[in-house]
Amino acid sequence: MALKYAFYSCPYCGEEIDITVDLSEGDQEYVEGCQVCAKPTRFVVYVHGDEFMLDVYGKND
């Protein structure tokens, strides 16, 4: 399992939040509630070997 840590700013409340990304899952997209304001946040993860890119959107963006 290849876990990496990332930080993002919530598209709703602007709070900076840290998350763990599991690179062994490959490219992925999922919705999870913000740890601060609980609004639905859409995460899109692109995996390239040991590197990844994380895009974060409001649920309807």
Image: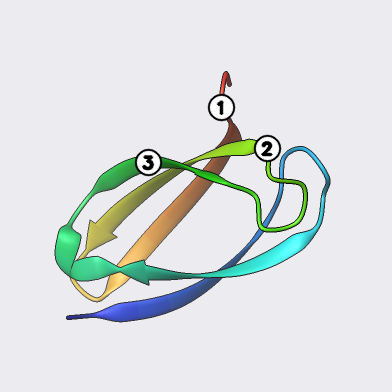
Q: Secondary structure at mark 2?
A: loop
The C terminus - image quarter: top right
Q: Nearer the viewer, residue 10 or 33?
A: 33
Tell me which label, 1 or 2, sits earlier in the chain. Answer: 2
Q: Residue furthest top?
A: 60
Measured from the top left, where is residue 20 in percent x and y? 44, 72
Res 22 → quadrant: bottom left
Q: Give the image location of residue 3, x and y in percent.
A: 31, 79
Q: Nearer the viewer, mark 1 or mark 2?
A: 2
Q: Distance of mark 1 from mark 3, alpha carbons? A: 10 Å
Q: Earlier in the sequence, mark 3 or mark 2?
A: 3
Residue linked to disc 2 = 39
Q: Is residue 15 above or below residue 38?
A: below
Q: Nearer the viewer, mark 3 or mark 2?
A: 2
Left or right of 22? Residue 32 is right
* Three-letter amino acid code of the residue under disc 3: Tyr
> Quick one: which residue is furthest to the front in this view?
38
Image colouring: rainbow
Residue type at tag 1: Lys
Residue at image location 23% in from the left, 49% down from the top: 27
Instruction: Name the mark on residue 59.
Output: 1
- Where residue 51 sits, quadrant-wise, is bottom left
Q: Earlier in the sequence, mark 1 or mark 3?
A: 3
The secondary element bearing badge 3 is classed as strand
Query: Could you give the CA–CA distance between mark 1 and mark 2, rounded to whole angstroms?
Result: 8 Å
Which percent across, then down, holds residue 28? 27, 46
Label 3 sits on residue: 30
Hey, what amino acid is under mark 2?
Lys
